[in-house]
Image (spheres, rainbow, N blue to C red):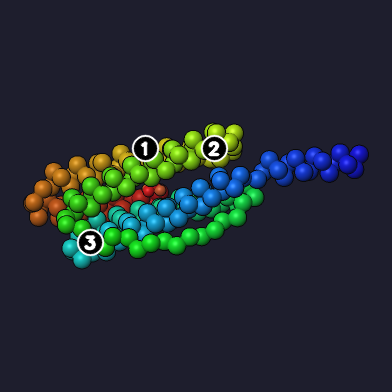
Amino acid sequence: MIFFVFKLKFVVVKEMTLSDTMRDSLNDQVKWELWSGYYYLSMATYFYEKNLPGFAKYWTVHAAEEQEHAMKIFKHIVERGGRVTLQTIEQPQTDWNSPLHVAEEVVEHERKVTGMINNLVTMAKSENDYATEVFLQWFIDEQVEEEEGAEKVYNQVKLAGDSGTALLMLDIEFAKKAAAKEED
Ligand code: OFO
């Protein structure tokens, strides 16, 4: 009987554990989410310098969201019995040619992140790691929103074109969007 209890415990512990490859890939994703936050914060500094505080605030709030994404994955690794290993976060780009250039790069970056999440789902499926696969569903949905949001920003900034007045009006809109996001 004692043996039976022991055996059962062992099986339960084993099922909770992430594979080394899954753990390492999730650890990489923690770094990329934190890096995304760093990247967006760098964009915020660009907009502060350009006297567009609404855009700056918007990207600052977005940076904080990326930190939350990193912490979601951090928590999942810990809950599944894995060890989080924090990695070096490289310096992001610090300058852009124009607000439209920023918007273009955000779209490109979010598409890359979607690819990373998709790769993680493929890995979880191939390892029959159902818990991680289900956990990643939130990120799949989030990336649909993030890509849609990034494309919308791009289209709005493109419409503003070279008009300083249009850009200033958009800046007011982005300040409101940032405030709404913060209240969420
Ligand atoms: Fe974490 O969603 Fe953007 O990158």
Report the amino acid beneath label 3: Asp
Q: Is residue 3 above or below residue 52?
A: above
Q: Secondary structure at mark 2?
A: helix
Residue at 48 percent across and 52 percent down: it is 28
Q: Secondary structure at mark 3?
A: loop
Q: Is residue 66 above or below residue 138?
A: below
Please give the label number shown on residue 95.
3
Q: Say which label, 2 or 1, has the lower sequence index.
A: 2
Report the amino acid beneath label 1: Val
- Mark 2 vs 1: CB contact within 8 A: no
Q: Say which label, 2 or 3, has the lower sequence index.
A: 3
Is the residue indicated by label 3 positioned so its CB lies within 8 Å of ligand 1?
no
Mark 2 = which residue? 124
**Residue 17 left/right relative to 164:** right
Corner quadrant of residue 98: bottom left
**Residue 67 left/right relative to 2:** left
Residue lying at the far bottom in this picture: please name it: 49
Please give the label number shown on residue 15.
none
**Residue 91 picture location, percent across and down:** 35, 63
Regarding residue 170, the answer to whether it shows in the image is: no
**Residue 145 picture location, percent across and down:** 36, 39
User: Residues under labels 2 and 1: Cα distance?
Assistant: 20 Å
Mark 1 = which residue? 144
Residue at 46 percent across and 50 percent down: it is 29
Residue at 54 percent across and 37 percent down: it is 124
Report the amino acid beneath label 2: Ala
Is the residue indicated by label 1 positioned so its CB lies within 8 Å of ligand 1?
no
